């Protein structure tokens, strides 16, 4: 199990593969806490969205400017004295390290789920550029948070409201 998150949590990054519920859970957490919220998908450059919409997995080179933009948003919130929740895949440790930029006020919430369930959710999703065909590449890239990371893992085995309550209780923010 990953390390106990920082006690001075000001920022939560809800992470996991596409279709695990990041946006739903992150927006519920932000709403409950009264914190800022952003879906990192909205920060992708148009070229990334174009690639993904055509079923082409992103490379690390594609992701780097996007990850730096996420870190910039988080830094802006920090500088403005705000707290926030970000929905972001953050699939690899080096991505999470780039987003966190060494700060100790960021915790990652890894939404862990069964591939079949997530595939089913993606297939039912309407109006999103991420096709089901990219799910395998997401799982291939996924590095679950390790014990040295400020993260918790939460199984997506309950309705969104219950998951959000579980996360808030685990982080002692509820």
Image: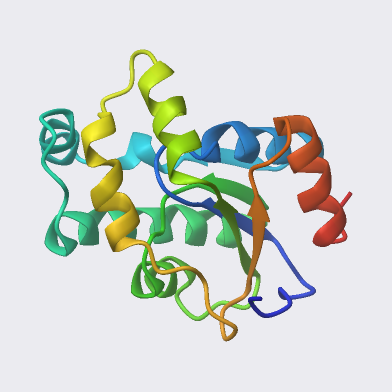
Colour scheme of the picture = rainbow
Residue 67, percent across and down?
32, 58
Q: Residue furthest bottom?
A: 148
Q: Residue at x 57, y 86 (%)?
A: 148
Residue 142, percent across and down?
37, 62
Residue 12, percent across and down?
63, 56
Image check: 26 left or right of 94?
A: right
Q: Quadrant of the N terminus?
A: bottom right
Residue 51 visible (yes or no) = yes
Q: Residue at x 14, y 58 (%)?
A: 59
Q: Residue at x 43, y 65 (%)?
A: 99
Image check: 14 left or right of 47?
A: right
Q: Quadrant of residue 95?
A: bottom left
Q: Nearer the viewer, residue 20 or 42?
A: 20
Residue 130 visible (yes or no) = no
The answer to whether 162 is drawn above or below residue 144 in the figure is: above
Q: How many marks?
A: 0
Residue 16, percent across and down?
47, 51
Image check: 23 left or right of 133?
A: right
The answer to whether 164 is drawn above or below residue 7 in the figure is: above
Q: Quadrant of residue 62?
A: bottom left
Q: Residue furthest front?
A: 116
Image check: 46 left or right of 139?
A: left
Q: Nearer the viewer, residue 76 or 37?
A: 37
Q: Residue at x 48, y 68 (%)?
A: 144
């Amino acid at each position: 199990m990953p390390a106990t998150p920082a006690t001075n949590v000001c920022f939560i990054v809800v992470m996991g593969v596409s279709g695990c519920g990041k946006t739903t859970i992150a927006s519920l957490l932000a709403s409950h806490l009264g914190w800022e919220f952003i879906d990192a998908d909205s920060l992708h450059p148009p070229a990334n969205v174009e690639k993904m919409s055509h079923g082409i997995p992103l490379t690390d080179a594609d992701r780097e400017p996007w990850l730096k933009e996420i870190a910039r948003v988080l830094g802006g919130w920090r500088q403005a004295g705000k707290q926030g929740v970000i929905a972001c895949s953050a699939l690899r440790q080096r991505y999470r390290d780039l987003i966190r930029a060494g700060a100790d006020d960021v915790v990652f919430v890894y939404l862990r789920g069964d591939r079949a369930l997530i595939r089913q959710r993606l297939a039912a999703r309407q109006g999103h550029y991420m096709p089901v065909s990219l799910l395998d590449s997401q799982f291939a890239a996924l590095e679950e948070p390790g014990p040295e990371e400020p993260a918790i893992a939460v199984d997506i085995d309950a309705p969104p409201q219950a998951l959000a309550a579980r996360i808030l209780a685990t982080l002692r923010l509820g």
